[in-house]
Amino acid sequence: MNQKERRAARGLQIVAVCCCFCLLAVGAGVTYRAMDREKAGDGEILQKEQPVTAVQSKTIEIAQAEQRGEAEKTKEIKETKEAKETKAQPARKNEQPVFAAPLEGETKVVLAYSTDHAIYDPTLEQYRTNASVSLSAKKGTEVKAAADGVVKEVKKDAQAGNLVRIAHGEDWLTTYGQLADAVAVKEGESVKQGQRIGTVAAPTKYGVALGEHLIFAMEKNGEPQNPMEKMKTAE
């Protein structure tokens, strides 16, 4: 082998050695990366499968207890608020108002209250029931509210003439009929007991035989009441 051939053979040996080193280096890199990935994967698995310790369990119980405590506290505050609101609302009173006579002084009953049996009406000349009481009074006599209330209606009626209805709370209602045209109150107006609401007028043709008088009626929840009895028992 001459010198030229020896140089070519040595060059091939060097190239082969370099290739071997390159292959070793690549293999080592692949192996390292695989090992690193496997280690990281094992770490994730271990982390996921890590059991709950006693300390962590205690922390969860404390958090749950605090949550339950907040819920109970919120419920207690709500119940207390509702109780206060209920207590603040006054109970509805169904007590009878203290009724006073709508006319001053002693008055004569010219047509009595009678709903359970018929009584004689001298104007109509017949027997009939009567859900009001007619009180003798001269024309121009002041008519006063029997109790505190609110005027519910002011109108002209064919039989009772000008009339005023006053509500006393939710249950009671009084009616004043045979009033003069100059009624002193208006619908929706609040009135006090003894306040002037009008004056007695001349009777209509349906009550002319009774003379000058005031028609006075009283109701409780829409049911007629005897005004004379209610005024007698009022204290």
Image (tube, rainbow, N blue to C red):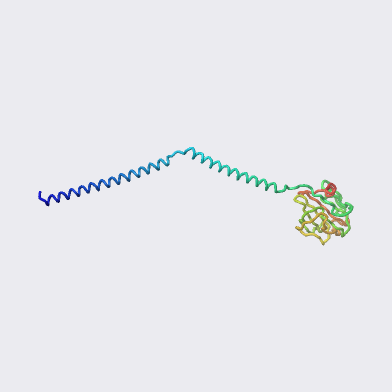
Looking at the image, which is closer to me, 84 or 232? 84
Q: Residue at horizontal 36%, vertical 42%?
A: 39
52 sits left or right of 99 in the view: left
Q: Quadrant of residue 193?
A: bottom right
Q: Position of residue 79 (x, y in %)?
A: 64, 45
Q: Residue at horizontal 87%, vertical 56%?
A: 213
Q: Quadrant of residue 34?
A: top left
Most extreme residue toward the top is 54
222 sits left or right of 3 in the view: right
Looking at the image, which is closer to me, 24 or 72? 24
How many dots with numbers? 0
Most extreme residue toward the front is 3
Most extreme residue toward the left is 2
Q: Residue at horizontal 80%, vertical 55%?
A: 192
Q: Position of residue 167 (x, y in %)?
A: 77, 53
Q: Is residue 187 above or below residue 76?
A: below
23 sits left or right of 142 in the view: left
Q: Position of residue 209 (x, y in %)?
A: 88, 55
Looking at the image, which is closer to me, 40 or 177? 40
Q: Position of residue 179 (x, y in %)?
A: 83, 58
Q: Is residue 214 above or below residue 80?
A: below
